[in-house]
Amino acid sequence: MNPSKKTVMLGLLAISLVLFGGGILAFFLTRNDSICPNGKPPVAQRSAILEATQYRCSDGVVVTKG
């Protein structure tokens, strides 16, 4: 009652396609996340071991996260 080689290969292909599709979906859902309110990436950051990280945005706003 062993599965045939074709069945195993189709199963691996199906699992690979599901994982690949999940990765694309995760990227699509998080693509617009930005720390700065203007939607651009920060130009500088400053962090210490026990403190929250501070990000300086391109428009001069400082955002603290963490």
Image: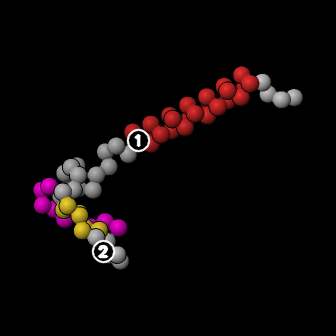
Counting residues from the start of the chain, the first of labels 1 and 2 encountered is 1
Q: Which mark is residue 27?
A: 1
Range shown magenta: 58-66
Type of the residue with mark 1: Phe
Residue 18, position as x, y percentages in the image: 56, 34
Q: Is 36 situated left or right of 31 in this image?
A: left
Q: Residue 48 shows which numbered tag?
A: 2
In front: 32, or 50?
50
Give the number of the disc on residue 11: none
Q: Residue furthest bottom?
A: 50
The image quadrant where one finds the C terminus is bottom left
Magenta span has 39?
A: no
Q: Amino acid at mark 2?
A: Ala
Secondary structure of the residue carrying tag 1 is helix
Residue furthest out toward the front: 5
Q: Is residue 44 above or below residue 4?
A: below
Image x and y of residue 22, in percent: 51, 38
